């Protein structure tokens, strides 16, 4: 016999799933699914088989039975995992998810995997074992055909074959099954392309055959054929020489049923070896035996896929190739629905390992789910669409990028403030500075905000004091910061005049209130800051010079020229800086140091 010539020997097999394809190699597997947003999600796992199972899967005639059982369990689990990605289901499913989560903290997908496995096995036994036996038994009541007659087994075989073909044909009525078979075709085309050394692109793969020697359909047909032969011989021998005296029809039926169940592992093992043997060769003799399985593939269980389906299959195949080549490649998971408490706990654990405050995890879930942080204790299902948004934020947060840059905005003193790498993220303590400023403003005052950054102080003052007919000017050295601050003013519907200025350089006029939160971090301390701050927030908004007081010195030198009579200067400062800053403003009428919520001297109020 001549061996089939292949440029690549693929030890990778596959399975079509809902809107996707699963590929499995010797030590890893990957499932690629196109989600409702049109994106391809990939879940990849290392195959962890016990020592005894690994040995069993290498023993001829035993490995077939082991593969059948493991494939059944893995196949159902993979189908359910894929279904949880491709869509959340209808309203009734969502209600059931919520009920399971609240009552038992259980995931619907996990429940369905168990139920489906039991139902799947029961249906297979009922349709392909009990039904043929029952139908032939009915015929036996009106004819002399019985278990000792050759025609009985011919008829039983024909019925099994018709039921098998009829079942495959009947389920084609369902649109989802037709799409499943298109993905089945994509799986075969991809493997065929690889084995023939063809570039794995949708355009190239599309030209390959959707029929493959090692297809599960061919295996099922071989199982059916072997089943007919083996069961016929064993049943004939048993009822001819052993149970010849058994006349009770019910008992005979149970005996036949028991024989089929007991012989299932033997039939599976033998069929697997036949399939492996046939797949090795390509000649007229073996092609005769391959033909029925290929015909069923061609007419029933595969369909021509579109380019997007082929792309999904290629993604799954390439992921397995990558994992087989490099044991260090990490596993990945689908982003699916889940139980809130479990997901939140897992996120907090991941953040703790990355030295990220767990409050960020709570903020992520509360923002995406549209609930308050204190409501996170109420159990609920996080559906796939929500999980996907949460996962994307978590992945980016784990890179070190600050949460509010990822979200894109933050709350500050009742205002919505856009933030990105052009400006510092407004700190909660600075809201106290805004509050002191608002309480200091009087009717018709002119207010100046120096080092405005995102514009949070100027905007919150203008918005809170809109009825006092005040005017607000905001200045910053950074043009980029000014651009973002203007967006924030428009977003909050307030009128603020923005000036590009290095402190007072281009500022004109006198003001009743000047407020400033300048850079005050010592230059040598910047590398010691949290990585979120030192790696992402603008250094120009942090660096206060060698002692952190450079900006305060410059303000002290010029502020009197820009304050109106009885004007007030409000400053924010770093921990331990307040007394040193006060010394810079020796000629003053009044000064007060105020603490933040942690009892740290944080704010200075000066009147001249």
Image: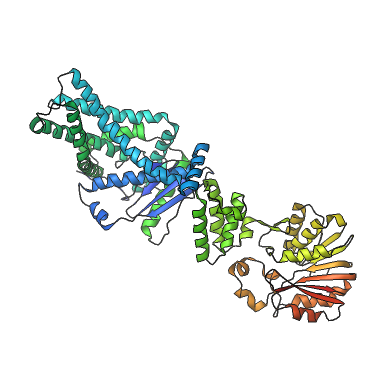
Which color scheme is applied?
Answer: rainbow
Q: Residue at x 43, y 36 (%)?
A: 179
Image quarter of the N terminus: top left
Residue 384 pos. (x, y %): 52, 46
Residue 483 pos. (x, y %): 74, 59
Q: Quadrant of residue 209?
A: top left
Residue 557 pos. (x, y %): 83, 78
State the residue lying farthest toward the left: 241
Q: Residue at x 19, y 20 (%)?
A: 141
Q: Residue at x 19, y 17 (%)?
A: 142
Q: Quadrant of residue 15?
A: top left
Image quarter of the C terminus: bottom right
Q: Nearer the viewer, residue 292 or 347?
A: 347
Instruction: Name the side, left or right, on which 64 lies relative to 559.
Output: left
Instruction: Name the side, left or right, on which 272 lies relative to 181.
Output: left
Q: Is residue 270 above or below residue 45?
A: above
Instruction: Name the side, left or right, on which 464 lies relative to 529.
Output: right
Instruction: Name the side, left or right, on which 351 lies relative to 81.
Output: right
Residue 453 pos. (x, y %): 73, 64
Q: Nearer the viewer, residue 319 or 430?
A: 430
Decide if residue 309 is in sight here. Answer: yes
Q: Is residue 538 above or below residue 268?
A: below
Decide if residue 197 is in sight here. Answer: no
Tally of numbered discs: 0
């Amino acid at each position: 016999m001549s061996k089939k010539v292949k440029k690549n020997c693929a030890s990778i097999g596959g399975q079509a799933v809902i809107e996707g394809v699963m590929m499995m190699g010797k030590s890893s597997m990957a499932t690629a699914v196109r989600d409702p947003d049109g994106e391809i999600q990939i879940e990849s796992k290392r195959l962890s088989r016990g020592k005894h199972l690994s040995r069993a899967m290498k023993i001829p005639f035993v490995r077939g039975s082991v593969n059948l059982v493991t494939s059944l369990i893995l196949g159902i689990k993979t189908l359910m995992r894929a279904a949880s990605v491709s869509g959340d289901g209808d309203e009734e499913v969502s209600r059931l998810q919520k009920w399971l989560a609240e009552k038992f903290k259980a995931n619907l997908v996990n429940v369905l995997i168990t139920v489906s496995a039991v139902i799947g096995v029961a249906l297979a036994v009922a349709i392909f074992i009990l039904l043929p036996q029952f139908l032939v038994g009915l015929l036996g009541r009106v004819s002399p055909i019985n278990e000792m007659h050759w025609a009985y087994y011919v008829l039983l075989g024909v019925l099994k074959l018709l039921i098998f073909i009829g079942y495959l044909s009947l389920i084609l009525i369902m649109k989802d099954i037709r799409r499943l078979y298109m993905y089945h075709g994509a799986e075969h085309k991809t493997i065929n392309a690889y084995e023939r050394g063809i570039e794995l692109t949708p355009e190239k793969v599309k030209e390959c055959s959707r029929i493959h020697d090692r297809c599960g359909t061919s295996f099922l047909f071989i199982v059916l054929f072997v089943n007919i032969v083996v069961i016929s011989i064993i049943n004939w021998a048993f009822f001819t020489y052993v149970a010849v005296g058994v006349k009770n029809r019910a008992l005979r039926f149970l005996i036949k049923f028991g024989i089929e169940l007991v012989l299932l592992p033997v039939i599976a093992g033998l069929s697997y070896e036949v399939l492996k043997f046939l797949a090795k060769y390509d000649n007229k003799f073996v092609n005769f035996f391959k033909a029925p399985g290929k015909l069923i593939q061609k007419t029933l269980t595969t369909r021509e896929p579109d380019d997007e389906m082929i792309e999904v299959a290629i993604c799954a195949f390439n992921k397995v190739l990558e994992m087989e080549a490099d044991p260090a490649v990490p596993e990945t998971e689908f982003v699916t629905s889940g139980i809130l408490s479990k997901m939140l706990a897992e996120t907090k654990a991941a953040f703790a390992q990355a030295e990220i405050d767990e409050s960020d995890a709570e903020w992520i879930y509360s923002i995406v789910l549209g609930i308050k942080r204190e409501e996170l204790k109420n159990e609920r299902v996080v559906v796939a669409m929500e999980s996907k948004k949460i996962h994307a934020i978590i992945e980016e947060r784990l890179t070190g990028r600050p949460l509010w840059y990822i979200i894109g905005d933050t709350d500050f003193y009742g205002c919505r403030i856009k933030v990105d790498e052009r400006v510092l993220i407004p700190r909660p303590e600075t809201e106290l500075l805004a509050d002191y400023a608002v309480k200091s403003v009087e009717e018709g005052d002119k207010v100046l905000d120096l080092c405005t950054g995102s514009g949070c102080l100027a905007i919150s003052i203008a918005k809170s004091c809109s009825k006092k007919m005040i005017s607000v000017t905001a200045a910053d050295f950074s043009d980029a910061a000014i651009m973002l601050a203007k967006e924030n003013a428009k977003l909050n519907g307030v009128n603020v005049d923005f000036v590009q200025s290095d402190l007072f350089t281009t500022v004109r006029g006198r003001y009743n209130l000047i407020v400033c939160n300048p850079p005050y971090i010592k230059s040598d301390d910047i590398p010691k800051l949290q990585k979120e701050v030192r790696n992402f927030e603008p250094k120009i908004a942090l660096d206060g010079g060698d002692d952190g007081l450079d900006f305060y010195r410059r303000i002290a030198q010029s502020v009197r020229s820009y304050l109106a009579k009885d004007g007030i200067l409000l400053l924010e400062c770093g921990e331990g800086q307040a007394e040193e800053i006060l010394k810079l403003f020796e000629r003053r009428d009044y000064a007060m140091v105020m603490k933040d919520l942690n009892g740290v001297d944080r704010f200075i109020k000066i009147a001249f």
